[in-house]
Amino acid sequence: MHRRSPWFLLLVAAIVTYPFVVHFNLLADRPLHAVIGLFVVLAIGLLVSLAYRNRNAATIIALAILGCALVLNQVGTLQALYLPPIAFNAGLCALFASTLRPGKMPLITRYILKMEGEVPPELVPYSRNLTRIWAGFFALMALTSTLLALYAPTAIWSLFTNFINYLLVLLLLGGEYFMREKLFPHRQQRGFINFLRRLIATNFHRHHE
């Protein structure tokens, strides 16, 4: 299926608008509307995963829908909104950290391999350390989201999880890109925007360690 199919574009639109839907509905004291937005995004994600025949993604999203529904039923509306940012960041932390085990290829090393077709020797230790940084970053984001959910006003929690968290991801991506330019000036980077496009388009389906 083509990446720019209507389903894919619908998912992108839902993901982009979701933080605004949640944040401004919470500011207007309409948490149920924000929860509805959450389930709409998850439902679209599930449909897209099934359309792309990505069983792993479909299973994860289905479990996320079930988990949010259980929390909503047993605990409350706000708690159903608190869960996804914590689970998302913790899941990414686990993903990066799991590739640092002995015998595994670090996740950043995999990206370099898929994007460039090879991993130059000087980038091997660099990519391992960068994978550690990303694992630590997402652990910090998960911890911060948890503490804000427990102790901060809802508006502050929402501002961080719906906007600041993503801004920090972009800042880390940009900082790493320019640091790599300084450390490895002989490697052609072809611009930050092009780097982001290649990063998003990276496909691991045919990768074998």
Image (cartoon, grey):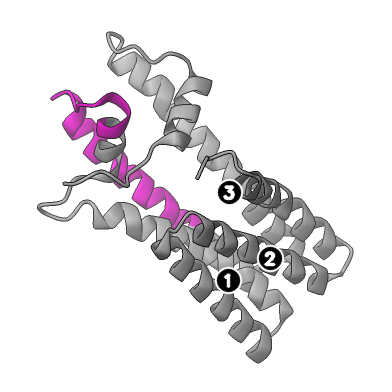
Q: Which mark is residue 9?
A: none
Q: Find disc 1 in the rendering and name its residue.
A: 83
What residue is shown with label 2?
38
Residue that lies at the very extreme toward the bottom in this rendered image? 74
Q: Residue furthest top?
A: 186
Task: Specify start and end residues of the magenta stretch as a single range.
Answer: 113-141
Question: Where is 202 relative to 144, above or below?
Answer: above
Q: Residues within 10 Å of mark 1 (few under 14, many from 20)?
A: some
Amino acid bearing label 2: Leu
Residue behind mark 3 = 165
Cα–Cα span, label 1 and label 3? 15 Å
What SS does tag 1 mark? helix
Magenta stretch, main secondary structure, is: helix
**Please, what secondary structure does the residue beneath circle 2 have?**
helix
Front in this rendered view, residue 47 or 37:
47
* Labels 2 and 3: the sequence-earlier one: 2
Residue at image location 17% in from the left, 55% down from the top: 101
Is 165 part of what is drawn in magenta? no
Query: Which comes before the other along the chain, label 1 or label 2?
Result: 2
Name the image quarter holding residue 110: top left
Residue 203 on image: x %, y %:
37, 40
Residue at left offset 29%, top offset 33%: 114
Q: CA distance from mark 1 to mark 2?
A: 11 Å
Residue visible at 28% across and 55% down in the picture: 97
Mark 1: amino acid: Leu
